[in-house]
Image (cartoon, rainbow, N blue to C red):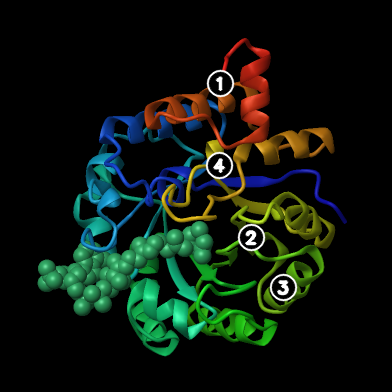
């Protein structure tokens, strides 16, 4: 049942960098994506077309999209919360065009309100024309279901609440179902229970897990998903993400850590771990800190790097 190949969707350039409190140079973002491509990542969430007032770090979306590498077999995605976002993502024509858009809703009303300033029902109304127009433009549409394992405002989130949103996205014609543990509180059996709800509506190859590692549960939750046959996961190089000033907030599970675990299990990813560690070191140096990735740090120390 455990898959022999896993696809990792690198979300570091978007989910990882969006919370950085100081501006990250556009050139660093572009070089990060270039290095990720060199390392063998073939699905990369590059940026988001959201309000720059809400997320100033992603305001250079079009410049980044215009300069990142393009090659066949490489799928670049961007987040779009509404039609305005999709129109902006398509405005530059071929030069800035993504291959895929991600619409993002929440399993809890409270998080939907805080994150995208509308209820779950209103978000579905906003997403409906986005899905149609994105498909007309030849783009794949992926969803992210935030707070699938718990909400910072509501607390517990039930599998029924998650399945409700899965069904709404399915009815809209969304191609792929991303299940996100936004605050990293999920544990393996609960993760499996929620994933089984998604798998009632989507095939195995169109369900993915997105685990923030706040409570150190991400790797074991990925393993729990592998046991169900799920083979796509979002990960963030160097463990980028979270706000350094928000106590306890952390990023997605580090891509290096996941690749190391999968390699050890004999599961292929197509990713060159050494080149990935280079990419993680590059962006961590640019941000002025050590990689959060345990594997990244360990391999860099082995190469002779010294961290304070
Ligand atoms: P709103 O204020 O409710 O929207 O924001 P509005 O339609 O009333 O528009 C207000 C202003 O925003 C207007 O500008 C619009 O033009 C502008 P003004 O007239 O005031 O100058 N606007 C936009 N500008 C650029 N791009 C757009 C856009 N839409 C409106 N697409 C909105 C609604 C959703 C836009 C806002 O709440 C927003 O941008 N939120 C940011 C959400 C976000 O990026 N969150 C982080 C990503 S999600 C995530 O990290 C979770 C995930 O990783 C999974 C997980 O871990 O859970 C995916
Ligand atoms: Mg996230």
Mark 2 → mark 4, Cα distance in angstroms: 18 Å
Say which of 148 and 132 sits in front.
148
Q: Earlier in the sequence, mark 1 or mark 4?
A: 4
- What residue appears at the point 49 percent right and 76 percent down from the top-left corner? 106
> How many discs mark residues in the rendered view?
4
Q: Which residue carries the number 1 mark?
A: 307
Q: For the residue carrying disc 4, how many other residues have a C-alpha within 10 Å: few (<14), some (14-19), or many (20+)? A: many
Given this view, does label 2 or label 4 mark the residue nearer the observer? Answer: 4
Say which of 87 and 226 sits in front.
226
Left or right of 47? Residue 211 is right
Q: Which residue carries the number 2 mark?
A: 208
Q: Earlier in the sequence, mark 1 or mark 2?
A: 2
Given this view, does label 1 or label 3 mark the residue nearer the observer? Answer: 1
- What residue appears at the point 28 percent right and 30 percent down from the top-left corner? 27
Given this view, does label 1 or label 4 mark the residue nearer the observer? Answer: 1
**Label 3: element kind:** helix
Q: Earlier in the sequence, mark 3 or mark 2?
A: 3
Q: For the residue carrying disc 1, how many other residues have a C-alpha within 10 Å: few (<14), some (14-19), or many (20+)? A: few
Q: For the residue carrying disc 3, how many other residues have a C-alpha within 10 Å: few (<14), some (14-19), or many (20+)? A: some
- The location of residue 274, given as percent across then percent down, is 62, 21
Q: Which residue carries the number 3 mark?
A: 199
Q: Earlier in the sequence, mark 3 or mark 4?
A: 3
- The location of residue 239, given as percent across then percent down, is 55, 42
Left or right of 167? Residue 127 is left
Quarter-of-image position of residue 217: bottom right
């Amino acid at each position: 049942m455990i898959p022999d190949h896993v696809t990792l969707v690198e979300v570091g350039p978007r989910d990882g960098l969006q919370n950085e409190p100081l501006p990250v140079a556009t050139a660093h973002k572009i070089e990060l994506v270039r290095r990720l491509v060199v390392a063998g990542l073939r699905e990369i969430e590059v940026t988001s077309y959201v309000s720059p007032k809400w997320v100033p770090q992603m305001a250079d979306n079009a410049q980044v999209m215009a300069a990142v590498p393009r090659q066949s077999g490489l799928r670049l995605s961007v987040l779009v919360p509404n039609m305005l976002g999709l129109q902006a993502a398509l405005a530059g024509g071929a030069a800035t065009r993504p291959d895929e858009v991600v619409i993002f809703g929440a399993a809890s009303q409270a998080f939907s309100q805080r994150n995208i300033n509308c209820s779950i029902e209103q978000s579905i109304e906003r997403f409906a024309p986005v899905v149609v127009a994105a498909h007309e433009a030849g783009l794949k549409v992926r969803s992210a279901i935030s707070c699938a394992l718990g909400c910072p405002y509501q607390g517990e989130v039930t599998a029924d609440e998650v399945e409700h949103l899965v069904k709404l996205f399915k009815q809209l014609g969304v191609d792929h179902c991303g299940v996100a543990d936004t605050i990293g509180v999920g544990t393996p059996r609960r993760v499996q229970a929620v994933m089984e709800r998604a798998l009632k509506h989507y095939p195995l190859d169109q369900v993915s897990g997105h685990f923030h590692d706040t409570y150190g549960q991400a790797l074991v939750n990925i393993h729990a998903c592998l046991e169900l046959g799920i083979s796509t996961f979002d990960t963030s190089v160097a463990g980028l993400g979270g706000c350094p000033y928000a106590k306890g907030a952390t990023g997605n599970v580090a891509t290096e850590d996941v690749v190391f675990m999968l390699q050890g299990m004999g599961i292929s990813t197509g990713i060159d771990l050494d080149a990935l560690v280079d990419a993680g070191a590059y962006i961590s140096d640019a941000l002025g800190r050590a990689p959060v990735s345990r594997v990244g740090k360990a391999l860099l120390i082995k190469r002779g790097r010294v961290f304070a």
